[in-house]
Image: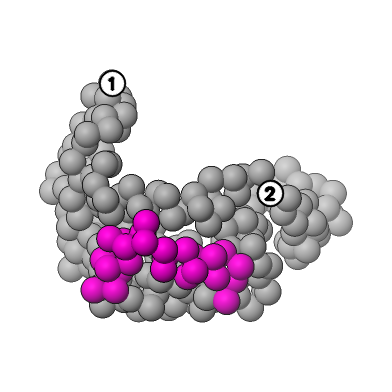
Amino acid sequence: EPVPFIDGPMRFHYKEVASVQADPKQMRVWSLASTTPTEECHARTLPLFFSSGTPEHTQWRMLLDAAGFADMHTKELTSASSLLDAAWLEKLRRAIGLKSMLPAPTEVEVARIVIPLVFEGIWGKKMESSDVYKVLPYVEFGKMCILGKRGKNIGVVQPIAVGASKSAAIAFARDSPTAEKLAKLIQEPRFSVLKTLLETTEQTDESLQ
C-alpha cells in the first residue's frame, strides 16, 4: 500500500525490505526514510546510523551488552497490574463496572503505565510520578521525529517539547545503576573508538551519561 510522506507516496514491498534489513553489510547513513533527521530528535552518534561491522557500531553493541542490555528482558519489574491499579481512570472504569461503555484507554494513559516500566528496565531505577510527567510529552511529540528536518520546517516536529522530554529522561538516567556501568565501561581500551566519537560530539555529556 502507498504510504503518504512529505515527498509523496512511497511503496514498500515486504520481501525487499526484509532482505535489506537482514543484510549485515547494509550501509547506513544519518537518515530516516527519505529525509535528514533533526539533531533535536536523533543524535548522529546513535548506533542506528553506523553500518554493521564498523568499529563504532561494533563497540556500541558491545558496550550496551556489557552494561546489561543483552539480558534486560529477563529482569523482574514492578508489575503492570500494580501501575494499572494506580491509574485513576481505570479505577473509575472498574467502579462503574461498565467498561464497555467507557472510552478505551488513551495513548497518554497507556504511556503513564508503560514509561516507568521501560525506564526501570533500562536504567535499573524506579520513576517517580513527577519524572513520568516530564517525559510524557514525548509520547505526543516524539513520534513526529520520523519526519526529520522537513517535518521541523513545516512545524510538525516540535524541538522545544522534544528537547524538554529528552533532557528530563537524561536527568533521570544520569545517576542510575546502568549509567554508572556505562560511564565506567567506556573508559576501557576496547571502547576507545566509541569514546573518541562521543567526546567529539556537541552533546558529549548526554552521550556518555
Magenta residue span: 175-200
Q: Taking the image as drawn, is residue 92 in sight? A: no
Q: In the shown orientation, is residue 39 left or right of residue 71?
A: left
Q: In the shown orientation, is residue 55 left or right of residue 80?
A: left
Circle 2/circle 1 CB separation < 8 Å: no
Q: Taking the image as drawn, is residue 110 in sight? A: yes
Is 106 colored magenta in this rendering?
no
Dot 2 falls on a residue whose secondary structure is loop
**Residue drawn at 65 percent across, 67 percent down:** 125
User: Sequence order check: which comes first, mark 2 or mark 1?
Assistant: 1
Q: Main secondary structure of the magenta part?
A: helix
Looking at the image, the residue that sits furthest to the front is 189
State the quadrant of the N terminus: top left
**Residue drawn at 47 percent across, 63 percent down:** 185
Residue 188 position in % (x across, y down): 41, 63
**Residue drawn at 15 percent across, 44 percent down:** 8
**Residue drawn at 76 percent across, 47 percent down:** 99
Q: Is residue 12 above or below residue 71?
A: above
As drawn, the label of residue 75 is 2
Residue 88 position in % (x across, y down): 75, 65
Q: Is residue 170 above or below residue 104?
A: below
Is 185 colored magenta in this rendering?
yes
Dot 1 falls on a residue whose secondary structure is helix
As drawn, the label of residue 15 is 1
State the quadrant of the C terminus: bottom left
Q: Is residue 1 above or below residue 124?
A: above
Which amino acid type corresponds to the residue marked 1 in the rendered image? Lys
Characterize the local packing of mark 2: few (<14), some (14-19) or many (20 or more) Cα atoms within 10 angstroms: few
Near-viewer residue (187 or 204): 187
